Amino acid sequence: MSFYVVVGAGPVGRETARLLGEEGHDVVLTSRSVGSNALRNVRPMQADATDASELARVCQGADAIFMCAMATYHRWPTDFFPIIDGTVRAAEAVGAKLVVLGNLYGYGENADSPLRSDLSLDPTSKKGTARTIMWQRAARADVPAIEVRSSDYLGHGAISYFSLVALPSIIEGKPTAFIGNLDATHAWAFTKDVARTLVAASRYTGEWGRAFHVPSQYASPRELIQKTAAMLRQEVSEIRSYSIAEMEALGMHELIEMSYLFENPLLVDSSDAEVLLGIKASSLEVMIADTLRDHLRA
């Protein structure tokens, strides 16, 4: 059995730790506020990823480190760099492989669809630039590194545009607004599939220094809203898209620069993850049901 450290105790980090622990590995799940857990073979340990020395002590003897930590969304351009730098230095100090959780922002607005994992990164947003620099720093590390890139999340505990903007109105049976082109096909990734891809990528025997895409399911925002309402046996009387002026008035400033992701079809080529890692996307129905689970408990 191996020893792994998962940095970041969000929904993907916890699920990654759970999968590894269920396989019988020794796992440390760490963050600045990790809390307690009852996951098999998983030890919660408080640590700050920006402190490379502290994190290296936690990671001593680790076979791989999973960098699943998140920064506050509007502070990505400042807060993410100390996190990735600390994690890279810790991995180098202990000689552990590095598996980084990323997303699709780095490809930018002008990338051809479907997005391929070997496309050059050409960000057109501040957040995309931050993600690109993070991967570049990881790829330059003195240890092998892989990035697993995901589209927008669905799943229990996921905080996404869909869960923040549309889901509360759907649950209440109210008119629902979202962003972008409501009929543009969009890739949705299940948090549990993201974790499975991270675990599989850590065992990849080919050449590292590359990315994999998480296998996704596809639905336009309108279709996703309608399917979610149907699962709740609700009817949505109106579905519309916010204008930029409305988004500004509502304080959705962080969404505006990324709204291009929803203006045109967003398709993701994940064939390499499917063939080389053996990962298949869960059904959209499973993703929706898991998304609703904690929201309906509230």
Image (tube, rainbow, N blue to C red):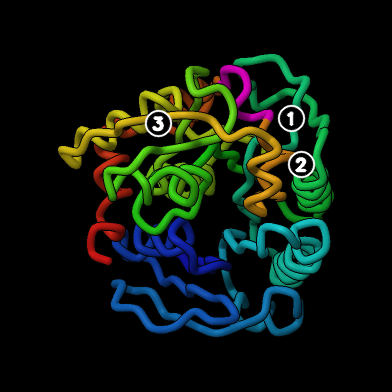
Which percent across, then down, holds residue 132? 79, 43
Compare marks 3 and 2 and give the one earlier in the sequence: 2
Q: Which mark is residue 296?
A: none
State which mark lies toward you, 3 or 1: 1
Which percent across, then down, holds residue 44? 45, 80
- What secondary structure is marked by label 3? loop
Discs 2, 1 touching: Cβ within 8 Å: yes
Residue annotated with mark 1: 107
Residue at 40% across / 33% down in the picture?
279
Q: Give the amino acid type for the residue marked by disc 3 in the picture.
A: Gly
| Residue 261 is covered by the magenta coloring | yes
Q: Give the amino acid type for the residue marked by disc 2 in the picture.
A: Gly
Q: Is residue 42 shown above or below 116?
A: below
- Name the side, left or right, on which 238 lies relative to 139: left
Compare marks 3 and 1 and give the one earlier in the sequence: 1
Real-space Cα separation, disc 3 to disc 2, in angstroms: 28 Å
- What secondary structure is marked by label 1? helix
**What segment carries the magenta color?**
260-266
Could you tell me if residue 139 is visible in this image? Answer: no
Which percent across, then down, holds residue 298? 27, 66
How busy is the neighbourhood of tag 1: few (under 14 within 10 Å), some, or many (20 plus)?
Answer: many
- What secondary structure is marked by label 2? helix
Residue annotated with mark 2: 128
| Residue 83 is covered by the magenta coloring | no
Q: Is residue 274 shown above or below 152?
A: above
Return the residue nearer the eye: 15 or 19.
15
Real-space Cα separation, disc 3 to disc 1, in angstroms: 24 Å
Q: Residue furthest left?
A: 233
Residue annotated with mark 3: 278
Q: Is residue 223 shown above or below 56?
A: above
